[in-house]
Image (cartoon, rainbow, N blue to C red):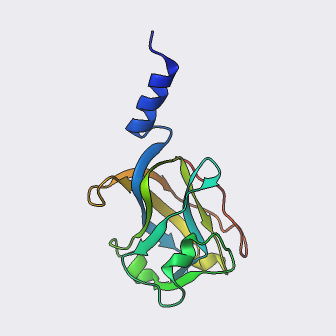
C-alpha cells in the first residue's frame, strides 16, 4: 500500500493536477480583431493569484507589461498587433520567482471582445528554455468590460 501523501507528491511533481515550476508562458494567442488587449493575465493555484514578474517577447505600444499582473482591472496592456501575436513567436511570460504549484490561469478583459483572446496555450519551464504545454483553450468568450474570465484548468 502506498500512502496517499506520496501519491499526491508524485502527481504534483509530474505535472498532473497541478505543477510546481517557476516560469509560465502564454503562446498561440488568437485574437478576433486587429490587436490584443487585456487587463490581467495570471496563473493561479485554485482561485489564489500567484504574484509574478511579467515579460513579453515584444512590448505593447500602449500600457506596461507590469499591468498584466497588478491585480487591477482598470489598467491594461494593448496594441500588440494581431500579426505579431499570431506570427508564432509571440509570448507573455510570468516569472514566479520560485517554483510554485499552478493549477490553472485567469484572464481579465478590458474593453471590447474583438481584442480579447479566443485561443491561448499555457506552458511551463524550469529553466526558461525547454517548455512543456500545461493546457490549451480555444473558443473562449469575452467575459465583459473590465471583468475576470473564469479560472481555466486543463
Q: Residue 42 lies in what quarter of the image?
A: bottom right
Please, which residue is most extreme toward the left here? 129
As drawn, 42 above or below 36: above
Task: Give the left or right position of residue 33, taking residue 112 as reference.
Answer: left
Residue at (54% x, 51% y) in the render: 104
Count of numbered marks: 0
- Outermost residue, bottom side: 61
Q: Is residue 58 left or right of residue 43?
A: left
Q: Residue furthest top?
A: 1
Q: What's the residue at 49%, 28% (across, down)?
A: 8
Q: Foreground: 68 or 151? A: 68
**In the image, residue 124 lies at what x, y percent?**
39, 54
Vertical placement of residue 120 versus 34, above or below: above
Q: Residue at x 46, y 71 (%)?
A: 54
In the image: residue 58, left or right of residue 148: left
Residue 55 placed where, x, y %?
42, 73
Residue 99, position in %: x, y? 42, 50
- Asked whether residue 144 appears in the rendered view, the answer is yes
Residue 34 visible in the picture:
no
Camera-side residue of 52 and 141: 52
Which percent across, then down, holds residue 100?
47, 49
Give the quarter of the figure containing the N terminus. Answer: top left
Of 81 and 56, which appears nearest the observer? 56
Q: Viewer-proximal residue, 40 or 135?
A: 40
Q: Which residue is rendered at x = 66% and y = 68% of the image?
A: 142
Q: Residue furthest front?
A: 98
Amino acid at each position: 500500500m502506498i500512502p496517499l501523501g506520496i501519491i499526491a507528491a508524485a502527481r504534483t511533481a509530474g505535472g498532473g493536477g497541478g505543477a510546481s515550476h517557476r516560469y509560465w508562458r502564454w503562446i498561440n494567442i488568437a485574437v478576433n480583431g486587429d490587436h490584443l488587449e487585456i487587463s490581467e493575465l495570471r496563473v493561479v493555484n485554485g482561485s489564489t493569484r500567484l504574484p509574478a514578474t511579467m515579460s513579453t517577447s515584444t512590448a505593447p505600444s500602449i500600457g506596461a507589461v507590469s499591468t498584466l499582473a497588478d491585480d487591477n482591472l482598470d489598467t491594461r496592456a494593448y496594441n500588440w498587433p494581431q500579426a505579431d501575436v499570431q506570427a508564432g513567436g509571440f509570448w507573455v511570460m510570468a516569472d514566479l520567482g520560485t517554483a510554485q504549484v499552478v493549477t490553472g490561469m485567469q484572464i481579465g478583459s478590458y474593453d471590447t471582445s474583438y481584442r480579447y483572446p479566443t485561443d491561448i496555450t499555457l506552458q511551463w519551464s524550469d529553466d526558461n528554455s525547454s517548455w512543456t504545454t500545461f493546457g490549451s483553450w480555444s473558443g473562449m468568450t469575452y467575459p465583459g468590460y473590465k471583468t475576470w474570465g473564469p479560472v481555466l484548468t486543463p
